[in-house]
Amino acid sequence: MMSRHANFQLRIKIISIVGIALVASLSLFYTPVRLVLTQAAYTASAPFFHFGKSINSLGNSLLTNFRSKDALVYENAMLRAENDRMQAQILDRNLLQERVMNLEEVLGRPRNDNRVVADITVPFGHSYYDTLVIDAGADHNIQNGDFVVYSGAGVIGEVAEVSAVSAKVKLYSTGGEEHLVLIGSHSVPATARGMGNGNFQAKIPQGSLVSVGDRVVVSRGNLILGDVTMVEELPGVPFRTVYFRSSFNPTEVRTVEVVVGSHL
Amino acid sequence: MFDLLLLGAIIYAPWWVAAPLALVGAFLFLSYFEIFAFGIYVDLLYGTSTALLHGSLGVIGATLFFFVGRFIRGLVRPSYTLLS
């Protein structure tokens, strides 16, 4: 039989657990409280994130000191060549952008893309939520639902939660997430299902003109989501399964652009 | 000290380093209630209200680890029970 003291202690522990459950529910499920606490968590954690960044750059500069001179000269030459190539591509891209803007003006729907460049504070794969945390937020006019793109290469996801100086980005490739897309030059409509790590899957009717290498764009915003890597066609099945992936590796992304105002 | 280590793992290390560390804490320390605070912190820092289970996987994991840690402790030292 339990003594009175043990009984009292047990009651205290049960009350503590119930209290913790209530606090957790209030902080996570009641949105206004959650937003205030998220802001507080980021304000409190900001020095730790900055410290991590400083340590990382210090480690990189220390490592550079130990690398051989020849390797550095070779890398420098490679980077210069790459830079020249990219400069040429930028000129080409600017020319194309100018043409697109002219066409859009002629069609009566001019687009003014206001983009905010943000560094990634918490990279892909760090947490079990498929989210990125970026160092730009409401202070930069970022709002929930704004598109997040990777250096013009394609859309990576959208802003899911914003605080003053940071925002959480929900990746489109998160397992189970579904988005409307248009596949290929014939713009075949489909629902893309995220499979994690930048991979997607979509089902399209038999006979649809889709092949490997076709571009996939999100129907809202007309931004590139990926390229078709495989089209599976099984006999007796009324649809074809299209597999596609982002044109970049999400784990290597360190900087993104937020298309401000694209949530409308 | 262990709390600092766990906090560091949550901020700097991937989740698969922090999660086993939290389980070790729940096993080593009797009444390791801090694990719930860490669970809420993880959800606030990385989760979103549109995510799976309203972004409360951290708290759910913490609850699971709290009881699993105590259960394993009870196996090693049979005088302990889940709510001892």
Image: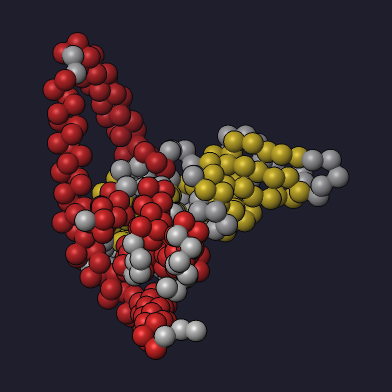
Q: Is residue A19 above or below residue A197?
A: below
Q: Residue A111: horizontal and vertical position, in percent?
A: 37, 57
Name of the residue lying farthest toward the bottom: A4
Q: Name the residue at 18% across, 34% down.
A: A59
Report how many numbered discs are placed on residues in the image. 0
Image quadrant in which the C terminus of chain A is located:
bottom left
Q: Residue A14: horizontal and vertical position, in percent?
A: 42, 82
Q: Is residue A237 left or right of residue A262?
A: right
Q: Is residue A235 left or right of residue A116?
A: right
What is the quadrant of residue A57 in the picture? top left
Q: Name the residue at 19% across, 58% down.
A: A46
Q: Inspect this view and state whether residue A256 appears.
A: no
Q: Name the residue at 44% across, 67% down.
A: B80
Q: Residue A214: horizontal and vertical position, in percent?
A: 58, 38
Q: Inspect this view and state whether residue B81 appears.
A: yes
In this view, the residue in front, A173 or B27, is B27
Q: Residue A42: horizontal and vertical position, in percent?
A: 24, 64
In this view, the residue in front, A152 or A32, is A32
Q: Is residue A54 above or below residue B60?
A: above
Q: Name the residue at 53% across, 41% down.
A: A245
In this view, the residue in front, B24 or B38, is B24
Name of the residue lying farthest toward the top: A70
